[in-house]
Image (cartoon, grey):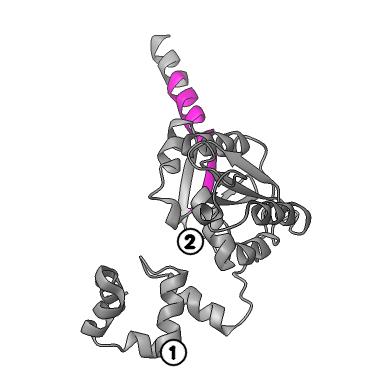
Amino acid sequence: MKEIFNIFLKNTQKEKIAERPRIQADYREKSSLIIPELVSLGVDSDIKELKVADYIVAGVAIERKTVSDFINSMKNGRLVSQLEELKQYESRLLIVEGIDEQDLYSDNMPEENIGMHPNSVRGFLLSILLNYKTPIVFTKNYEDTARFISVLAKKKPREAPLNVTKKFHDKKEQMQYILEGFPGIGPKTAKKLLKKFKTIREIMNLPEEELRKELGKKADNFVRIINSRY
């Protein structure tokens, strides 16, 4: 009887392990504190390259922004492109993380502190809700973000579209996106390189010393990836 009981106990344990919900997370999120926090909450993540969004949870596409990232991507126009891409999902969500750690806007704060007038931020938030039809969740910190994702992951999943693609408005944006795929190359650096050297081929063919002059320490990873074999 004891042996039979042990067999059923093992099967029950396997079933419990199999019941853990899984989500998809973009590979750029693997260094965040959210992934290990989700594990502690009983949610596993498949790390992969997502063409759109940072997380796919129960069929819902989630774009996550810290407060500073939200402000910066709003100013440089990147957030507009990301919101357009999110529209490919019927269910989508924007998470703005860290409102306990940094003010999103304040009428008592000098405009230069955030780089935008508080009413501009308010107007953009309204545009996200009304024009892009994308709900916004404001979270206290990464732990709070993970808890929201965990609650969503444990709901009944919805079917996600299979034909999601990265959308670009023009060739310039495509070129910029390619360069931003390199570690440490953000929108500002990508634009600077393209304005100066005009083509991606020209940038790739730059002598190493020239790359270091333009990129500083970021050139190490850039050069390594260019010269690596698949």
For the residues labelled 2 and 1, the Cα–Cα distance comes to 25 Å
- The circle on residue 199 is 1
Nearest the viewer among 149 and 185 is 185
Determine the image quadrant of residue 73: bottom right
Residue 117 or residue 150, whichever sits in front: 117
Does 217 appear above or below 71? Answer: below
In the picture, measured across the screen, residue 215 lies left or right of residue 170, that is: left
* Residue 163: percent from left, percent from top: 65, 66
Q: In the rendered structure, which segment of residues is drawn in magenta? A: 9-25
| Label of residue 141 in the image | none
> Seen in the image, is 149 located left or right of residue 10?
right
Q: Is residue 101 visible?
A: yes
Is label 2 in contact with label 1 (beta carbons under 8 Å)?
A: no
Whether 17 is among the magenta residues is yes
Q: At 52% across and 54% down in the image, what residue appears?
A: 114
Tag 2: residue type? Glu
Quadrant into which the N terminus falls: top left
Residue for point 21% across, 83% down: 209
Q: Earlier in the sequence, mark 2 or mark 1?
A: 2
Q: Which residue, given by chain and number where applicable, does mark 2 sit on?
A: 49
Name the quarter where the C terminus is drawn: bottom left
Q: Is residue 148 above or below residue 191?
A: above
Residue at x 45%, y 19% (from the top left corner): 9
Q: Of helix, strand and loop, which one carries label 2?
A: loop
x then y, percent, for residue 65: 53, 51
> Which three-letter amino acid code belongs to the residue tagged 1?
Thr
**Residue 133 pos. (x, y %):** 76, 54
Residue at image x 66%, y 43%? 157
Quadrant of the rendered image containing residue 165:
bottom right
The answer to whether any part of residue 162 appears in the image is no
